[in-house]
């Protein structure tokens, strides 16, 4: 997201290669004629490995305070690190294996809270703490343009609420907030962390569908899935660190 005074990268991917280098080489960070370079801030919508692995390549990093310790400690259990070779089209170097991958410790330069505003100069992004998928999940709301950068809080697919730090009750509350944004006419376009963008009507339907399905049966099945996922992640990440 480019601004007149600052640029923001929302989520940094796996980090197998340097995203800042790619952006510079592609000319996407070139300053306007006669202007100097702008600061570049990487904002993680949450610390899961596919969103936070590339933060190591940025000088300025922001994350919600609820997940700051996990990022600082390189906690690959909370980052739910789970990567296979078949998911990597271009390994970073010869002989590299996905078993070697881990999210490295990164010290965040800014801790985010509900209601914080990231000022880009000619546009502002408001932080909305939306736990459920993870405890520190956030959305960034461009109120003037009615754009919601939703991370993994909501995308056009099944919402994942069975990971170690997921919580259904939090997810329901976050979905109610999403529906309220639509009811108040504050969102017209959603740019999620996965898949294609969509509009307000689809956002409302996704959020309301989740709430309607979050009953007792869903909670029981989710609890079982979370237990299995937690064991698998602990085993996988103990192998990575050993």
Image: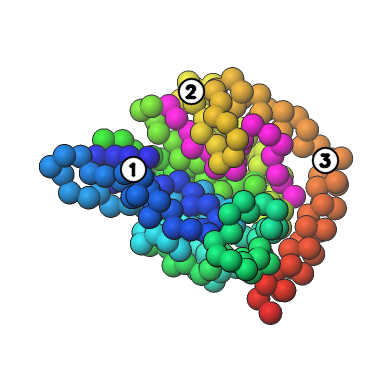
- Percent from the top left, x then y, of residue 64? 49, 54
Picture disc at residue 28: 1
- Percent from the top left, x then y, of residue 138? 52, 46
Residue positioned 32% across, 40% down in the render = 2
Residue positioned 79% across, 64% down in the render = 231
Where's the N terminus, which quadrant? top left
Q: Earlier in the sequence, mark 2 or mark 3?
A: 2
Q: Is residue 55 left or right of residue 154?
A: left
- Percent from the top left, x then y, of residue 63? 47, 55
- Percent from the top left, x then y, of residue 35? 16, 44
Whether residue 102 appears in magenta in the rendering, the answer is no
Indicate the secondary structure of the residue bearing disc 3.
Answer: helix
| Neighbours of disc 1 within 10 Å: few (<14), some (14-19), many (20+) | few
Mark 2 sits on what residue? 188
Q: Which of marks 1 and 2 is in front?
A: 1
- Which residues are the magenta region? 146-162
Where's the C terminus, which quadrant? bottom right
Q: In this view, does 2 lie to the left or right of 146?
A: left
Whether residue 160 appears in magenta in the rendering, the answer is yes
Picture disc at residue 184: none
């Amino acid at each position: 997201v480019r601004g007149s005074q600052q640029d923001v990268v929302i989520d940094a991917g796996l980090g197998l290669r340097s995203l800042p280098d790619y952006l510079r080489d592609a000319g996407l960070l070139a300053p306007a004629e006669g202007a100097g370079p702008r600061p570049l801030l990487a904002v993680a919508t949450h610390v899961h490995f596919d969103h936070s692995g590339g933060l190591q390549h940025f000088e300025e990093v922001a994350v919600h305070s609820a997940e700051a310790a996990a990022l600082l400690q390189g906690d690959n259990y909370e980052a739910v690190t789970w990567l296979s070779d078949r998911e990597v089209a271009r390994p970073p170097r010869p002989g590299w294996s996905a078993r070697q991958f881990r999210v490295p410790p990164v010290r965040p330069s800014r801790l985010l809270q509900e209601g914080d505003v990231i000022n880009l100069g000619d546009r502002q992004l408001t932080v909305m703490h939306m736990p459920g998928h993870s405890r520190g999940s956030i959305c960034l709301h461009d109120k003037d343009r009615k754009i919601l950068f939703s991370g993994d809080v909501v995308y056009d697919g099944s919402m994942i609420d069975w990971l170690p730090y997921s919580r259904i009750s939090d997810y329901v509350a976050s979905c109610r907030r999403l529906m309220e944004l639509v009811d108040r006419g504050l969102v017209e376009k959603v740019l999620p962390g996965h898949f294609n963008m969509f509009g307000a009507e689809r956002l409302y339907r996704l959020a309301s569908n989740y709430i309607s399905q979050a009953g007792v049966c869903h909670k029981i099945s989710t609890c079982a899935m979370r237990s299995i996922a937690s064991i698998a992640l602990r085993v996988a990440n103990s192998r990575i660190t050993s």
